[in-house]
Amino acid sequence: MNCDLCGKTAEGLAKAIIEGVQLDVCPDCTKFGRVISQPKRYSAKEQVNHMKRQLEKKEDKVELLVEDYSGIIKRKRESMGLSQKDFANRISEKESTIHKIETGSFEPDLSLARKLEKALGIKLVEHYEETHESSKSAKPAGFTLGDFIKVK
């Protein structure tokens, strides 16, 4: 992690109040303010075990729009009997934005997608989870370029 004050990369940043602002600072920068909490100290073995567990259990949660969001929005709006102009006024957006979304030339961000979900009563955002397994069991198939390079 980087120190908020000097930018130095350091493990175990302390929380300190410096000129009325709470910052995460390195041990060198704690002298410029009042320390609120010191970083928790772990033994070398505990640190290694903790890092291994983090790498093994690393999960990515991603939110993405459904594939045919434009068609879904258009069909639901039409089934509700709303014109693009009326629907745009209802959700406080521009008519041109609704038109671009429905034609597929504009992909709404997640906040706008959630607004559309709420207004239309449909599901547009899906949650995906990716899990990354430890590379301990993966064995290289052969030599890589890194096997032949000498680092000075």
Image (spheres, helix red, strand yellow):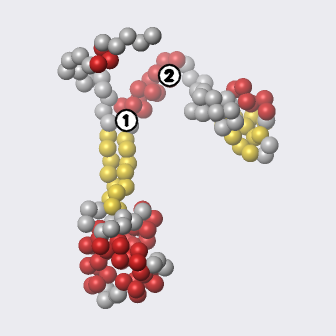
Tell me which corner region of the image, top left, top right, bottom left or bottom right, holds residue 102. Answer: bottom left
Question: Percent position (x, y) of residue 88?
Answer: 42, 81
The residue lying at 73 percent from left, 37 percent from top is 16
Residue 97 in the figure: left or right of residue 138: right
Where is mark 2, residue-wise?
46
Q: Is residue 5 above or below residue 85?
A: above
In percent of the image, x 23 and y 16: which residue is there? 143
Q: Residue at x 45, y 65 (%)?
A: 111
Query: Picture coordinates of residue 9 (x, y %)?
Result: 59, 28
Residue 33 seen from this side: yes
Does 146 sit left or right of 49 as displayed? left
Find out whether the residues at labels 1 and 2 contact each other: C-beta distance under 8 Å: no
Give the crowd class for mark 1: few <14, some 14-19, many >=20 residues within 10 Å.
Answer: few
Q: Nearer the viewer, mark 1 or mark 2?
A: 1
Q: Residues within 10 Å of mark 2 (few under 14, many from 20)?
A: few
Q: Identify the amino acid type marked 1.
A: Lys
**Image point 74% across, 30% down: which residue?**
30
Query: Which quadrant holds residue 85?
Result: bottom left
Q: Residue lying at the far left in this picture: please name it.
A: 141
Instruction: Residue 100: name its quadrant.
Output: bottom left
User: Is residue 105 toward the left or the right of residue 24 in the image?
Assistant: left
Q: Residue 57: which disc? A: 1
**Image quadrant for the C terminus?**
top left
* Residue kind at label 2, given as amino acid type: Glu
Question: What is the C-alpha distance between the residues marked 1 and 2?
Answer: 16 Å
Q: On residue 70, which mark appears?
A: none
SS for callout 2 = helix
Q: Position of residue 122 (x, y in %)?
A: 32, 72
Residue 103 location (% of width, % of height): 29, 73
Looking at the rendered image, the quarter that the N terminus falls into is top right
Q: The residue tagged with tag 1: helix, strand or loop?
A: loop
Please tell me which of labels 1 and 2 falls first in the chain.
Answer: 2
